[in-house]
Amino acid sequence: MKTLDSIHETATALLANKVRTGLTMLGIVIGIASVIAMVSIGQGAQKSIEANIQSLGSNLVQVFPGAQGGAGSGVSQGRGSARTLTYEDARAIASQVSGVAAVSAELSSRHQVSAKGTNTNTSVVGVLPSYVSVRNVQIAAGAFITDQHLKSLAKVVVLGPAARDDLFGENAEAVGQSVRINGMQFKVIGVTVPKGGSGFQNQDDTVYIPLTSAQKFLAGDSYVSSIAVQAADAAGMEVLQADVTTLLLARHRIADPAAADFSTLNQNDIVAAASSITSTFTILLGAVAGISLLVGGIGIMNMMLTTVTERTREIGLLKAIGAKKSDISRQFLAEAVALTVLGGCIGVLLGSLVSVGISLLGIIQTEISIGSIGLAFSVSAAIGIIFGYYPARRAAGLNPIEALRYE
């Protein structure tokens, strides 16, 4: 049987009962569309999480205080609850550890901030001028905190855009205005560029003040809540982490690293852990969506078996005029593959439209990859071959005499 004849016969057979053909393809369309949409959601979530982590700063090694309490007290309040890090630790890291691009000591706590009859409970972070480069912060209006502000214990603030909107109204001119934190008046000197929220904190809903002012007026102590160390080179982050650990152990006079009153966290480790979780999530979504492909494949096999029964006399006639088993088998297999490939094309288009629609609606950012589309086509073709093989073999194995007698 020639290729053109096979294509013509396939088209004729599928168009003979358009409703049944459409309903049979529907399972494959839904299955492929689900796989494309679910995988794109998973990959989009992964990219979004990685971008949010990177927005907190690039090439970072973060240092946190150890747990308050412990074996001696019988009660532990969790990592970061102790007050074991100081501004002097940050300065020592900056001056004594090689491979450091910048260091930012931070003191973070939540406070009620008010202005002009409005108020919001937000994160107030005491920072150094280096915070801008370490945390990838950009200024939309005004200026950021300077060394002079630190030295003079200045009562100045830089607002995140969300905090600005809560206090003064959306996109209002806030520079030069005043806010009150814990009853003390601070002057607004700048507003940051929007960065969006992340799994750790919403940097847009943050108020920045000089670290020394935060220690003096808000904490009443010299401790810091964390130290962010930016590596000059991403490849040297593990060495930098080890050097920072060694230095702080020596400064805190701790001989046993297991008894350290601080902990360090490599940003690459955070990204790797997040990627691992979202990859597992993507695989799970794809597997759940893949079940519908299996159901669609069974539907195709059921249709093809019904078609074989309906066309028994036709098969007998083809064999009687010289058609070989391979010709009959190839014809029915071609019909099954045509169903799945056509359904796969429609499914890819539908899945892509769903993914784009989800992104446009702002539900979650999705990312359609060429790999997922290629996988969808491959799976659809494989389903056509796998679930079309048995009906094709059954048709090819019919006895021509019995087939011609079939009513």
Image (spheres, helix red, strand yellow):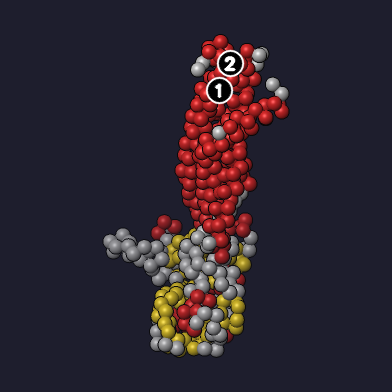
Q: Residue furthest top?
A: 401
Instruction: Please say if 97 is above or below 287.
Output: below
Could one spot residue 211 in this view of the protein?
no
Q: Residue at x 61, y 20 (%)?
A: 328
Closest to the observer: 247 or 289?
289
Percent x, y for residue 389? 56, 25
Q: Name the secondary structure under disc 2.
A: helix
Q: Amino acid at mark 2?
A: Gly
**Which callout, 2 or 1, points at the residue further toward the start of the chain?**
1
Percent x, y for residue 38? 51, 49
* Quadrant location of the N terminus in the rendered image: top right
In the figure, residue 3 lies in which quadrant?
top right
Task: Name the residue beneath numbered marker 2.
Answer: 316
Q: How many marks?
A: 2
State yes or no: discs 2 and 1 in contact (Cβ < 8 Å): no
Which mark, by number, is residue 203? none
Q: Residues within 10 Å of mark 2 (few under 14, many from 20)?
A: many
Could one spot residue 376 in this view of the protein?
yes
Percent x, y for residue 230? 58, 65
Task: Name the residue beneath numbered marker 1.
Answer: 311
Q: Amino acid at mark 1?
A: Arg
Instruction: Please say if 338 is above or below 355.
Output: above
Q: Residue at x 32, y 62 (%)?
A: 76
Closest to the observer: 25 or 21?
21
Percent x, y for residue 402? 53, 12
